Image: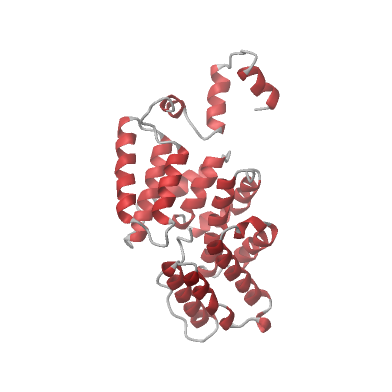
Amino acid sequence: MSSSTYYRFTHDGTDISAVKFIQLLDRLDSSLTDFINLHSPEDITNQQFFTTYLHSVSTGKINERSLQTLLLLLQKVNNDRPTPRYLHYIWLTQSCLDHARKQPYHFQQDLNRYFTSITTWTSSSLIMLGLSAPFIPFLSLSSMFSTVCEAFDAHLDRFDVQKAYSYFLVNFALLTILNQSQFAFIRVSKLFLKHKFLDSTLTMSVYVRLINLLNVWLNHPETFSASQLRPLANVLRDFNEPVYADQLNEFSQLFEHNFLTDHPSVLRHPLYQVF
């Protein structure tokens, strides 16, 4: 809503109509049930969920026990007061557990349908997408890429949205390599040049450097050497990120084997969890 309309409702005592109120909730990617549950002491807020989820997956190794506890809590709350928001959290948490256990993603199609049906992106739905990107089919991510990036650009005044944008772009860039999509990689690599905040953390800066080197390989192969990739894993090891270092080392070796020799092999462990 406009600033003047917001002021009328919050300061002038003007009543909002039921129609406008429901429209406003819809634009906020919420519902009347969500609004009512905000007054419940048992409600799990966006920030509470995202903070707990990231704590379980951002330490270089997925904490399955913590994620399982979070999943059971979400299922209980959703059974007591079902809302779309809780359901989305369950999809993401279960997908991450499936990834850690090397199982098929139970809710891949549910996540895919949800994100491809969004018409108005909010900061919450963008953060959810940033974390869910590894569990959505690559073709769907590609089809919504331009629209999503425009939505992210409109919400970059929030630091948590900036971080989610970083997750989304890095994961998407790596998926373009795995899916051998040169066009998509060019699109995403341009955004790394545009947004300097993407390398705001030391670990993320290593991935940005990786993508920049892959961009050199794509556009100026005569100046590229596989030896440029090898030190990146050591940098992550120096940052006390041994799991990421091992993954990146494997990625570098298999990238060299797949694209720089005549004997391709299989990348067994894609770099999905880069946060």
Residue 270 visible in the picture: no
Total marks in image: 0
Q: Residue at x 44, y 29 (%)?
A: 34
Quadrant holding the N terminus: top right
Question: Quadrant location of residue 268?
Answer: bottom left
Which residue is farthest bottom? 262
- Location of residue 79 with respect to 112 vertically, above or below: above
Q: Nearer the viewer, residue 249 or 106?
A: 249
Q: Residue at x 42, y 59 (%)?
A: 59
The reply, left or right, for residue 226 in relation to residue 75 is: right
Q: Nearer the viewer, residue 98 or 248?
A: 248
Q: Position of residue 185 (x, y in %)?
A: 60, 65
Q: Residue at x 53, y 24 (%)?
A: 22
- Location of residue 38 with respect to 73 vertically, above or below: above
The reply, left or right, for residue 92 in relation to residue 154 is: left
- Location of residue 234 with respect to 112 vertically, above or below: below
Q: Position of residue 174 (x, y in %)?
A: 53, 66
Q: Position of residue 68 (x, y in %)?
A: 30, 49
Q: Residue at x 34, y 45 (%)?
A: 70
Question: Quadrant location of residue 5?
Answer: top right
Q: Nearer the viewer, residue 223 or 178?
A: 223
Residue 207 visible in the picture: yes
- Location of residue 148 with respect to 207 vertically, above or below: above
Q: Position of residue 99 (x, y in %)?
A: 37, 59
What colouring does the structure picture have? secondary structure
